[in-house]
Image (tube, coloured by chain):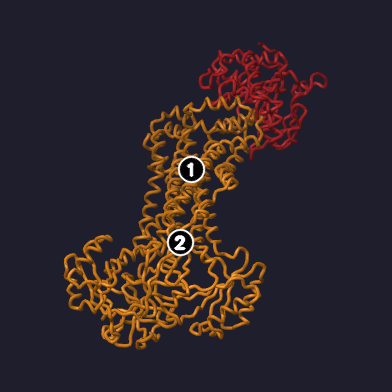
């Protein structure tokens, strides 16, 4: 590991939310992750950057429990994900992880409000309570009036806000964002960036995977550069937002 | 063209599962349709063909030679309307005192002819040669095939006539005689009657036959015509058993056809609809709209063609066994029972045509779709209908996985409607089959000894290399009755009889003793209690055009008696009537019973009873009776085969629908899993998406199945079911059936649901 990475570890301070230790992931002969180790503490906003195929998305999948490492430890919110089966991982994601995708991944058949409420309803929350909380979130994100609109009729920025609301529905310990502005025009992209900054400022831990240096600079306090499945460089950033 | 072929081949390879589903659905559907068509084909064509080949007689008429001379009879051949005629041939009835050849004692109609050929009724010689000299006889072989040369040379000793040597076996589709002798021999037998064989112009119906015969015999003295037999009666007799099965075979065939059309349409159109992104890619590569249509038609035609050909091969192989079962015991004469080529041709042409037609509609939509839109949409754009339903469901108290599943059918209403229709038909079939099985089992249990055993005792016959019994008929009955464990004993004598006005073979069962069990089988009227009474099955009534209350004249051993049909049995042979010992006494008083049925008291050791019978008289051959009801076996067998086929087809249809839905919703599934939907919830959601239509299908299919059951049991020609056997529906039974739709749906959905649960989220979300 580099010196930069060594300096990124702090023994005292906020609780560690994400810990990867010597994580390997192989797809056949291809090594996607090659002994990756890192830590993310509560309240941090970390951006992961690197060239295509360097292992950024694999890293995100490991942290979200969407994929399993070939070897190594993946610990999120104090839970070793390797100990969980598929159902355990689903329940874990439900409680601790919120995800935002480049292409929003909203359900076309449901209006914005139901899309957001869905995450809580899966945990058994009643429809009424879930909708009330969803409406609050949409209101906080400035799109309460679009609650009954179907995704097809929303702008890109609005769709991503709905996706953010859905990700925040169960008050996750960690918000994962995979190219959250990649499919948006610059104005909508800026709005989503502002939103992420606001969330981080109120204590939301954030892990961003992006190609966009501007997004990293604006939203993240730390930058992890990945190359060939390893952390190549780690550096602190001064948020410009 | 090579680009189209290459793209199609690649698509087939890439969609292996879908290709297999299309192939399997077409295979099962083809087999179902082919079996139904085979029976329809076999029921009519063989008789017509064989009848025409032999220039069969439209009417076989017998005349009293005391009233009409041979010259007068010969003149009738030239009367208007008569296309061709043969005769007059001398005709008499010989009485066989004991078992002869493969037949039991009784009467046989013998005709004197100088050869098998002629303008009408060209008798086909199967073995040996024609009878040309006195003392020779040719015997009619009633079924397909031949008795072989082994029985040639057998000497027959009819009562009151010289011995005759069998020199040949022959078959006549006109059933003009039971045996033939030379004219010289016939003259020696002093025939009282003469036979004329007529063919009338065209293919006359019953009315024209009556008119034609009346015109032909107009110049003959009154009452000279003693009997006439229409070829239509023979044709009805030929297909009577098949006719009995035909209503339900037709119903199953129609159900099979409907389910097949729906599922094939659904599967094939689904394959095209789900491939919209692929269509966009093809178009962007430079494929013309027509080439895209060609790719998709080829893609579905390849597995469909393989499934169709395999289905035809399996259907052809199975049809043989099905037809053999259907024609068991029917006098087919020289008509060969087999599946003609047309059902196979219809299936080979019709099924691929259906598949292409089903694919054409969505393929033409693909033809019009712009490349950009196709690529963006990924699958066919949703119509937006049903969105409100989804919204309402999300507000209910149902678990979210369930409400999401319930809402899915509304996203693709067309596909859901086709799947629902297939489930409805599947449930209809299951309901129909369970009802039919209950009815047939109840029918089979009638006369059974309600838990106690039943023993059949046959008197030994030296002709069959058995010991002759020591006890007389009456002594045998008494001994059987006195043995420990005997509860009821029935004695039976079987005789081959003639019915006045009919030349075809008939049989009579004469019963004595405890006939309560037999009486239980009467559905209309009563069991024959007095002399001159008989009970017959529905097949006998329809074959002879009779009803309960009608009278017939039964001839045996040179005597005849008038018999009133006083009861209709639930079932019975179309050629046999049941009567009592008093009636037999009028016809052949010295006849002895040779078969006895003993119903044992409950708890009796049946094996000990049969041992006791053998010890009492080694010339008695007891066997334990096992229920062996051909009709029950046939109906339940056919019904089960069709139900299995249709259920598999319906489940495959559901399987395909769910598979398509899962593929189309991969991105949604990935997202749902990413926000915490557990694998179990994915399975619940996916299964619920078809359980709804399954439940509705169950509720709609049950009444349809009940109606179909009623229609069938009212139309199985060989059995008249009493109301108690038709009323087979009870609440627990119906409740179980209501689950049939859900079961079919769940069975079809389970595999794709589990594959959806195992979907790798990361791949889906990053690739979509």
Instruction: Evaluate whether label 2 is on the same chain as label 1.
Output: yes
**Residue B621 position in % (x across, y down):** 57, 79
Q: Quadrant of residue A78?
A: top right
N-terminal-most mark, 2 or 1: 1
Q: Most extreme residue toward the front, as rendered?
A: B530
- Label 1 marks a residue whose chain is B
Q: Is residue B507 above or below residue B203?
A: below
**Chain letter for the part of the structure drawn in red:** A
In terms of depth relative to the viewer, which is nearer, B605 or A91? B605
Badge 2 vs badge 1, beta-carbon distance below 8 Å: no
Crowding at label 2, few (<14), some or many (≥20) Cα neighbours within 10 Å? some
Locate the C terminus of chain B and report the quarter of the image it occupies.
top right
**Which quarter of the picture shows residue A36?**
top right
Tell me if I can see residue A2 in this picture.
no
| x then y, percent, for residue A31 | 66, 35
Q: Is residue B459 above or below residue B714?
A: below
Task: Say which mark, if any, is on residue B525.
Answer: 2
- In front: B420, or B90? B90
Q: CA separation, marks 2 and 1?
A: 44 Å
Label 2, secondary structure: give it: strand
Task: Give the colour in which the image draws chain B.
Answer: orange
From the viewer's side, name the closer residue of A100 and B536: B536
Please say if B39 is above or below B395: below
Q: Is residue A192 at all visible to an observer of this figure? A: yes
Q: Comparing marks 2 and 1, which lies closer to the viewer?
A: 2
Residue B23's tag is: none
Picture coordinates of residue B16, whole percent (x, y):
51, 44
Residue hosting label 1? B422
Q: Nearer the viewer, residue A92 or A101?
A: A92
Q: Is residue B51 left or right of residue B622?
A: left
Image mark 2: chain: B
């Amino acid at each position: 590991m580099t010196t930069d990475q060594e300096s990124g570890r702090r023994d005292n301070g906020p609780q560690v939310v994400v810990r990867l230790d010597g994580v390997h992931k192989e797809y056949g002969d291809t090594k996607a992750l090659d002994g990756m180790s890192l830590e993310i503490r509560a309240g941090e906003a970390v951006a992961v950057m690197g060239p295509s195929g360097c292992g950024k998305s694999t890293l995100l999948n490991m942290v979200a429990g969407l994929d399993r490492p070939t070897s190594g430890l993946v610990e999120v919110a104090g839970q070793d994900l390797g100990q969980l089966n598929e159902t355990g991982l689903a329940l874990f994601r439900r409680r601790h992880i919120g995800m935002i995708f480049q292409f929003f991944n909203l359900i076309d058949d449901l209006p914005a409000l139901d899309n957001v409420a869905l995450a809580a309803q899966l945990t058994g929350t009643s429809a009424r309570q879930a909708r009330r909380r969803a409406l609050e979130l949409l209101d906080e994100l400035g799109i309460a009036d679009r609650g009954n609109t179907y995704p097809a009729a929303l702008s890109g920025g609005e769709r991503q806000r709905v996706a953010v609301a859905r990700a925040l529905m169960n008050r996750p310990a960690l918000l994962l964002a995979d190219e959250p502005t990649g499919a948006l025009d610059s104005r909508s992209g800026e709005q989503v960036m502002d939103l992420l900054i606001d969330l981080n400022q109120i204590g939301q831990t954030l892990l961003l995977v992006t190609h966009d240096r501007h997004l990293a600079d604006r939203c993240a306090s730390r930058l992890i550069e990945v190359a060939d499945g390893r952390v190549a460089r780690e550096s602190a950033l001064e948020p410009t937002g | 063209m090579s680009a189209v072929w290459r793209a199609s081949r690649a698509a087939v390879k890439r969609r292996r599962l879908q290709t297999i589903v299309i192939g399997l659905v077409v295979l099962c559907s083809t087999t179902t349709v082919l079996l139904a068509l085979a029976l329809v084909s076999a029921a009519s064509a063989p008789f017509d063909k064989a009848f025409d080949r032999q220039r069969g007689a439209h009417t076989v008429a017998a005349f009293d030679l005391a009233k009409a001379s041979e010259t007068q009879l010969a003149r009738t051949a030239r009367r208007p309307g008569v296309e061709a005629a043969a005769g007059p041939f001398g005709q008499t009835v010989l009485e066989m005192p004991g078992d002869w050849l493969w037949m039991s004692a009784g009467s046989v109609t013998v005709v004197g002819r100088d050869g098998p050929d002629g303008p009408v009724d060209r008798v086909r010689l199967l073995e040996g040669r024609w009878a040309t000299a006195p003392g020779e006889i040719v015997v009619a072989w009633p079924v397909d095939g031949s008795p072989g040369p082994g029985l040639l040379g057998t000497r027959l000793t009819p009562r009151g006539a010289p011995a005759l040597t069998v020199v040949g076996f022959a078959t006549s589709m006109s059933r003009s005689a039971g045996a033939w002798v030379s004219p010289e021999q016939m003259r020696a037998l002093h025939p009282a009657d003469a036979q004329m064989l007529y063919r009338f112009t065209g293919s006359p119906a019953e009315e024209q036959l009556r008119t034609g015969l009346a015109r032909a015999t107009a110049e003959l003295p009154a009452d000279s015509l003693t009997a006439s037999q229409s070829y239509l009666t023979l044709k009805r007799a030929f297909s009577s058993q098949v006719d009995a099965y035909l209503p339900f075979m037709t119903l199953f065939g129609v159900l099979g056809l409907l389910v097949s059309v729906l599922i094939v349409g659904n599967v094939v159109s689904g394959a095209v609809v789900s491939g919209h992104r692929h269509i966009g890619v093809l178009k962007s590569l430079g494929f013309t709209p027509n080439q895209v249509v060609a790719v998709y038609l080829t893609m579905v035609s390849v597995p469909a063609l393989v499934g169709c050909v395999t289905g035809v091969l399996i259907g052809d192989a199975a049809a043989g066994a099905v037809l053999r079962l259907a024609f068991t015991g029917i006098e087919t004469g020289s008509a060969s029972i087999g599946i003609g080529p047309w059902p196979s041709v219809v299936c080979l042409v019709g099924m691929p045509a259906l598949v292409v037609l089903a694919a054409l509609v969505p393929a033409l939509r693909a033809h019009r779709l712009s490349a950009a839109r196709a690529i963006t949409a990924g699958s066919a754009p949703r119509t937006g209908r049903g969105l409100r339903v989804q919204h309402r469901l999300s507000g209910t108290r149902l678990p979210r996985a369930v409400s999401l599943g319930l809402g899915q059918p509304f996203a693709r209403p067309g596909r859901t409607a086709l799947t629902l229709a297939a489930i409805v038909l599947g449930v209809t079939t299951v309901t129909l089959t369970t009802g039919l099985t209950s009815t047939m089992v109840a029918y089979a249990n009638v006369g059974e000894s309600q838990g106690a055993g039943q023993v059949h005792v046959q008197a030994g016959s030296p002709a069959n290399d058995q010991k002759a019994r020591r006890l007389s008929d009456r002594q045998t009955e008494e001994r059987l009755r006195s043995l420990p464990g005997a509860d009821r004993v029935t004695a039976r004598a079987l005789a081959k009889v003639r019915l006045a006005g009919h030349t075809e073979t008939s049989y009579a069962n004469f019963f004595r003793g405890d006939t309560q069990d037999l009486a239980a089988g009467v559905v209309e009227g009563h069991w024959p209690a007095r002399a001159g009474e008989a009970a017959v099955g529905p097949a006998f009534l329809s074959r002879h055009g009779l009803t309960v209350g009608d009278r017939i004249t039964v001839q045996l051993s040179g005597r005849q008696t008038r018999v009133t049909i006083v009861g209709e049995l639930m079932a019975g042979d179309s050629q046999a009537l049941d009567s009592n010992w008093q009636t037999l006494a009028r016809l052949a008083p010295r006849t002895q019973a040779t078969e006895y049925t003993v119903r044992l008291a409950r708890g009796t050791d049946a094996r000990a009873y049969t041992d006791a019978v053998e010890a009492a008289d080694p010339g008695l051959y007891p066997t334990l009776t096992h229920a062996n009801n051909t009709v029950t076996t046939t109906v339940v067998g056919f019904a089960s085969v069709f139900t299995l086929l249709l259920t598999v087809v319906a489940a495959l249809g559901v399987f395909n629908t769910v598979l398509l839905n899962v593929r189309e919703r991969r991105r949604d599934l990935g997202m749902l899993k990413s926000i915490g939907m557990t694998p179990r919830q994915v399975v619940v959601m996916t299964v619920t998406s078809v359980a709804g239509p399954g439940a509705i299908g169950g509720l709609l299919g049950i009444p349809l199945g009940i109606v179909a059951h009623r229609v069938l049991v009212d139309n199985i020609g060989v059995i008249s079911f009493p109301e108690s056997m038709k009323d087979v529906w009870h609440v627990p039974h119906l409740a179980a059936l209501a689950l049939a739709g859900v079961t079919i749906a769940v069975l079809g959905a389970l595999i794709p649901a589990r594959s959806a649960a195992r979907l790798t989220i990361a791949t889906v979300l990053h690739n979509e």
